[in-house]
Image (cartoon, rainbow, N blue to C red):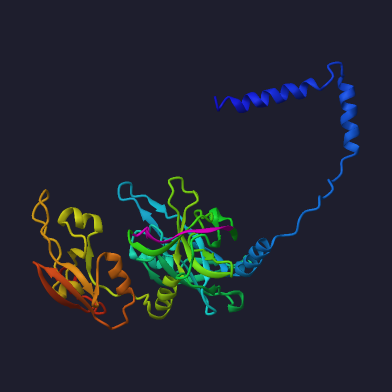
Amino acid sequence: MQRVLPFLSLFLVGVFAFSQVPSSSTRAEEDAVIAANRKGARPRPVAKGRSLSALEQERAKIFRQARPSVVYINASTSRGLLDRQTGQLHQIPPGTGTGFVWDDLGHVVTNYHVIKLDVPDPKALLDVMENIEVTLSNNRVYKARLIGRNISNDIAVLHVFAPLKDLRPLAIGSSKNLTVGQSVLAIGNPFGLDHTLTGGIISALGRVLLSDFITPIEGVIQTDAAINPGNSGGPLLDLSGRLIGMNTAIPTTTGANVGVGFAMPVDTLNLIVPELIARWNPEHPTLGFATLGIAPAFELFGIERGIVVSEVEANSPAAQAGLKGLTVKGANEKPLLGDVIVRCQGKPMDRPSQMSDEIELLMPGRPVVLEVLRDNQRVTLTLDPWKKPEPTPSALTKT
């Protein structure tokens, strides 16, 4: 019945309107009325409106001040993705999203998933690092490079090669004194619509968000400010215009906003971003081993904490240090467990992304110290990730 009512209502209105037209009118009379009305066509007078409220004025002011700090990010790669079944090379679509100016040195912060494309290999990732473009609020486009990333918390830091006078950093707030019900504003580029302002309140605090990289992000801010695809990496502001969070995710099956959005707390950013700027080394150290994901590690061995080493590359730093991977006996048999990494550089390790973050902040020349659980015994191993592995005999060219 609900689907019939709108049609029925429209039908009745149409009948009523038609009944007001004299049935004896002619086409000529109708044309005369239309022609007379055309002569009187002019713009409607503007009705008097009320002045903007104090809250509206404040919102508009915050947007004007923050707009130059919000940027549009486009990451791409010239490399293709090879389909091993067909042999065809498919172009990898670019990643787009939002970022914001962090400081007066040219650094922009965004979510790592904004620029992390489905690249086929580490070389393609390096290609992405060299093919990032940032569009400022003045519509000028500049090259940027990835200079730091934290996988566990989905954070990326870019260096934008734009005039510093055009880069205005946001004022930094704090996320520890936020209150549920507090008004907030979000600025971003949803669906490519640049510098879109949305507003709402803080709906909840202290949420735990599972990132795209299957890692928990602690202390997340929940808001009903509209956040959509393209808003990722954009700022969440309080009504003082201060950065209190970075918009990161929405839980939806439709891909659009449903009134629940999540922002990473600024206090987390303020701890991690300076470390990434100061210490991240683009020359990735080589360890030479692979690990199991969280789900297979639990399904195969019931391991909830620690990192299961799945495979060790021959002649790699890991092999030279004595790290042991899984032993596969037969195609249908359960593999035998090797080493489980429980500490890296003295810090407890629960999942592979934690170790990736620790290794990527490793200072050049510094060894990696792993504590592994092997046959219920704790073993300490020291890896030299900066030493070039020696080629295997089969790789040598005879002369």
Residue 20 lies in the magenta-colored region? no
| Quarter of the picture holding the C terminus | bottom left
In the rendered image, the residue lying farthest to the bottom is 365
**Residue 398 horizontal/vertical position (percent):** 17, 72
Could you say which is closer to the camera, residue 187 or residue 160? 187
Residue 203 lies in the magenta-colored region? yes
Looking at the rendering, the stretch of residues picked out in magenta corresponds to: 198-213
Task: Say above or below: 349 vs 300.
Answer: below
Residue name at image x 46 percent, y 45 percent: 254
**Residue 153 horizontal/vertical position (percent):** 38, 66
Quarter-of-image position of residue 60:
bottom right
**Residue 386 horizontal/vertical position (percent):** 26, 79
Quarter-of-image position of residue 395:
bottom left
Q: Is residue 288 left or right of residue 262?
A: left
Our reading of the magenta stretch's main secondary structure is strand
Q: Is residue 145 left or right of residue 384?
A: right
Residue name at image x 37 percent, y 69 percent: 150
Q: Is residue 300 visible?
A: yes
